Image (cartoon, rainbow, N blue to C red):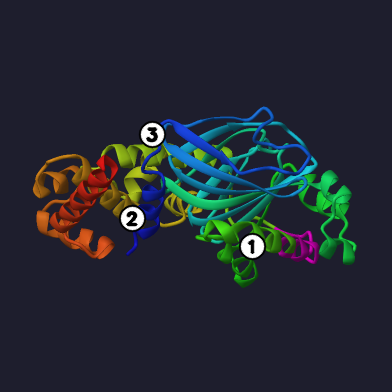
Amino acid sequence: MKHEPFIQIESILCDIPNGSLVLEQHTDDHQGSNLFTEQFESQTSGKGKLEIYPVFPGILLSLDWFLADQVSFRHGANRHILEITHCRFGRIGWNFKSGTSVYLGSGDLSLHSTDCCADSVMTFPLGYCEGISIFINLKELSLHMPPILRDIMLDPDLLYRWFCLPETPAVLPSGPDIDVIFRPLYGLPEQLRMPYFKLKVQELLLYLYRLSPEISAPAQVQSRQAALMQEIHHQLTEHLDRRYTIEELSRQYLINTSSLKEIFKGVYGMPIATYMKEFRIRKAMELLQQTDDSIAEIAAKVGYETQGKFAKAFKEFTNLTPSSYRKKYREGNFIQQKRTDV
């Protein structure tokens, strides 16, 4: 089902209230700095969870889940801490000090120093995200080098010059090499997490060490262009009962149609029509869960002329009719509530 990642993340975060970002820190037997205990603050109107593991001295790995439009972060700025972010599901964006905005889609990887994002806003154009963040203090890595990396004489200074000095991040587009490293790290049982984290962090560093530093981002736009797309997005999603054409939006926002389509896809990862179809169905799912509105009323609220067209689009997205989805969701909630009561 197209909506399955969204439902999985929703299930993981079901007990977390809106406006909360939960940090779950696992035991740290290593000495060294910890980005999440030193000057770390966050704020969101959505919700999220970070499960943080100390993999090696100076190296943290965080399993990340978000249901939010954006999260504001504030933490220590250190040019010698390399932050590596992998996007599994959803979409991630940052606005950087250089005036450039960078967006990650499914499978993409970004690399930059924590100096770039010490006081920043991470956006989630699709409203959800699952990913992994790895923080490597390159000074500590040089002092506490794991044996495998020591054997090949990995030079942390080279990683520093390649990935920590630029004002904007390097971004690696999704591909088999990145997938082989990160795919096994998701969905692990607790007892296998740390062994896999240790293995795959070293594999990642070996992979980065043999790369050419000539890496470019697949989805960079200027921050002012990203801001314009966010205005257009707000208009589209606040008025679901209205269907705007590309030409209307182009005239209203004084941008030619080809640029509008290209930049919107760069920010949100898909064409406007595709994005809005999925947004309408996710909004309908929310209304089916939270209200007793009739199917016809919900169809009208999310911009469908007839209940029949809405039901067809909903089933294409979820493999369920709207009424079946509502029944299944409420039965599941009832069972979960009974278990909680017991």
Query: Is disc 1 placed on a helix, strand or loop?
Result: helix
Q: Earlier in the sequence, mark 1 or mark 2?
A: 1
Which quadrant holds residue 229?
top left
| Amino acid type at mark 2 | Ala
Could you tell me if residue 270 is visible in this image? Answer: yes
Q: Is residue 205 magenta?
A: yes
Left or right: 29, with 248 as reference point: right
Which quadrant holds residue 254?
top left
The residue that disc 3 covers is: 17
Residues tagged 1 and 2 counted as in contact (Cβ below 8 A):
no
x, y percent for residue 185: 58, 61
| Local crowd size for mark 3, using a 10 Å CA cut-off: few (<14), some (14–19), many (≥20) | few
Q: Nearer the viewer, residue 239 or 107?
A: 107
Identify the residue shown where x is 82% and y is 50%: 141
Question: How much space separates mark 1 and mark 3, taking CA atoms?
Answer: 31 Å
x, y percent for residue 170: 69, 53
The residue that disc 2 covers is: 273
Decide: is 218 above or below 303. Answer: below
| Amino acid type at mark 1 | Tyr
Q: Nearer the viewer, residue 254 or 13?
A: 13
x, y percent for residue 12: 41, 48
Q: Nearer the viewer, residue 107 or 237?
A: 107
User: What's the magenta region?
Assistant: 203-215
Left or right: 341, with 252 as reference point: left
Query: Is disc 2 placed on a helix, strand or loop?
Result: helix
Question: How much space separates mark 2 and mark 3, taking CA atoms?
Answer: 31 Å
The residue that disc 1 covers is: 196
Report the disc number at residue 205: none
Identify the residue shown where x is 64% and y is 43%: 27
Q: Earlier in the sequence, mark 2 or mark 3?
A: 3
